[in-house]
Image (tube, rainbow, N blue to C red):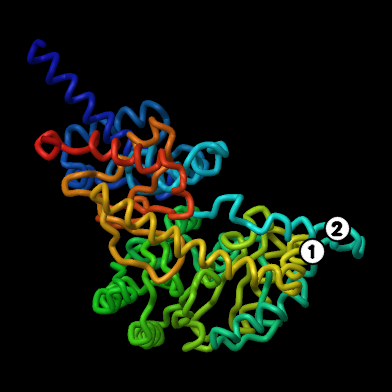
Amino acid sequence: MDQNVQSNTQSDTRIATVMQAIRQMIGARSLTPGAKLPSIRAFSATLRVSKSTVVEAYERLVAEGVIRSRPGSGYFVVAPLAPLSLVEAGPNVDRAVDPLWISRQSLEAGETMPKPGCGWLPAAWMPQEAIRRGLRTLSRGEDAVLTDYGTPLGLLALRQMLARRMAGHGIEASPSQIILTESGTQAIDLICRFLIEPGDTVLVDDPCYFNFHALLRAHRAKVVSVPYTPTGPDIELFAQVLAEHRPRLYITNSGLHNPTGAVLSPVTAHRVLRLAEHFELTIVEDDIFADFEVTPAPRLAAFDGLDRVIQIGSFSKTLSASVRCGYIAARPAWIEGLIDLKIATSFGGTNLSAGLVLALLTDGSYRKHVESLRQRLAKAMAEASSRLKAIGIAPWIEPPAGMFLWCRLPDGVDAADVARHALNDGIVLAPGNVFSLSQTAGSFMRFNVAQMADPRVLTVTDTAIRAAKPPAAAR
């Protein structure tokens, strides 16, 4: 290729990169109409391109009508407010393995497609007959349960039952401190609407449940993270992050951590709460995996008394993902505000789902189901750990319960590459960096042990690892 042609091609590529970066900032709403663009000097340093490249990119965007120049002042956005794009709001990662894509693939996969990367149990593991009995009972009950809106707080009898269940974990909450939601995700969404504004800082674990990242992007929060250890967040780094960033919220699991399976220790819990008080931090404790535990772990909400800690949960993992029923337990002064937000965003509650959950909790079927589920998961955990080790995949820890194994792949293997190869063979995997804000978990993978009975999972994963190995490592 002629050197001049090659040089022009490279220049056009760099200019296009700058233009795309600006479009992404507008799409993510970090640049809104009237906002000033980064200075030419600053943006050239950020993107490591020449100032002339940035000038040319800005001028082309002016010609397109996306921005305008004000001599002596700089460049400003003139495009109308763009629809919020969660893809553009996040880190620039391969769409094929980002959190939203994994969720879509897992949700859209057919029944025959193995998905050890998903976060729920197989349908055959759920109490289907008990659910059918409960639905038949509800169908013979009051008409309002089948057709009417629920009260804003939700079904009183279920809230009373939840208060008793929480007391079993040392958490004192009256039914009036509990508001029912359609899911754990909706619970976090309501809390974010209630407590944070766009641009506020929120702290998460690294790694953490990947939909925390996606949900916080939707709220346009600034997200920071702290490394998670086998006993909870790295407490020294936790203190540093609080001092430097002053986050409004910290969202975490403390029972069985997702994705690592780790359990918060009492010592770490007390230190976290002391720091939260000092830095005026509110903690959202996602307790969705509580019923998988054999031995209950410490709960921040129990130590704190629902002062700085808000606890949430749901029954989607243990009962049914189709029966949408979760809850928020919070200090009394916050419940009224959460009720107003719930009405504004979803109006009334769901009598049918709440009534079904209550029926299964009170007739004994849920308790028997969960006891069986723990035994089945323990067996699956042991088998999956052994089979993964046999192909060179090492669990980070051996979790005491639950359904997740957080594993390190063989040296030199990138989990995203493994996921791409596995997808071509019809297997959905969950590579580590979708859980990691810092993108430091590239050699890790989360496996759902309940979704690994199909022999294709290990065969395809092993083949994908071999295909993803660098040439030197493969020899």
Q: Secondary structure at mark 1?
A: helix
Kindly tell me whether residue 109 is visible in this rendering. yes
244 sits left or right of 107 in the view: left
* Marking on residue 462: none
For the N terminus, which image quadrant? top left
**Element assignment for label 2:** helix
Calculate the distance from the C-alpha at mark 1 to the C-alpha at mark 2.
7 Å
Q: Residue at x 66, y 78 (%)?
A: 162
Q: Tell me if residue 190 comes above or below residue 304 in the rendering.
A: above
The residue that appears at 23% across and 37% down in the rendered structure is 466
* Residue 285 in picture, x, y percent from top left: 49, 73
Label 2, on which residue? Answer: 146
Q: Is residue 135 above or below residue 251?
A: above
Left or right of 143, for residue 260: left
> Which sits in the foreground, 137 or 458?
458
**Dot 1 amino acid type:** Asn
According to the image, label 1 marks what residue? 351
